[in-house]
Image: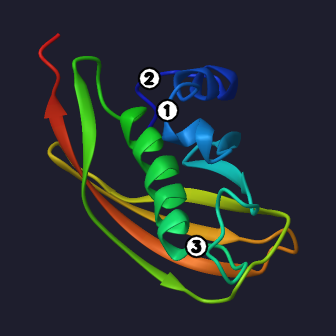
Amino acid sequence: MWKKQFSLSQLNQLCEHCAIAHLGIEFCAQGDDWLEAKMPVDCRTTQPMGYLHGGISAALAETVASLAGFCCVEEGYAVVGSEINASHLRPVTSGEVYAKACPIRLGKSLQVWQVDIRDERAKLCCVARLTLSVIRTGE
């Protein structure tokens, strides 16, 4: 499934100078058909009432699925998000959350990813689905 071989360290370096690093998102685990990232629940990621912000959960889901999708296309191609939906199932107020992206479909022009976000007790907090368009980068 993986067409580009990046270590977790390399994925984190790739994201050092953008919104991903600002939110504290860090890639932490990878398997044969999944990629996982973690994110702190703190002042950068909560809404005014102290709960994990739903939009930030969506950003976490899009981050992990987009980087996974990028690793599943040949050189000269990239992916861009075209649709995301997220169902917020339980509030989180502290600690870290873990987002695990698994492919539903890896097509030539379209990818669909399922992302489950869990808290530190492994309780499901959010379920998201991301559709990515595969584009040629011109290389």
Q: Hey, what amino acid is under mark 1? A: Cys
* Disc 1 target residue: 18
Identify the mark nearer the N-term, 2 or 1: 2
The numbered dot on residue 4 is: 2
Identify the element where label 3 is drawn: loop
Among the 4 quarters of the image, the one containing residue 85? bottom left
Q: Which of label 2 and label 3 is nearer to you? A: 3
Among the 4 quarters of the image, the one containing residue 1? top left
Kindly report the distance in space between the C-alpha atoms of the residues bearing marks 2 and 1.
Answer: 21 Å
The image shows residue 108, relative to residue 139, as above or below, that is: below
Answer with left or right where residue 77 lies relative to residue 33.
left
* Disc 3 target residue: 53
Q: Hey, what amino acid is under mark 2? A: Lys
Q: Tell me if label 2 and label 3 are in contact, CB under 8 Å.
A: no
Q: What residue sits 68% from the left and 89% below the top? A: 90
Answer with left or right where residue 63 lies relative to residue 75.
right
Identify the mark nearer the N-term, 2 or 3: 2
Q: Hey, what amino acid is under mark 3? A: His
The numbered dot on residue 63 is: none
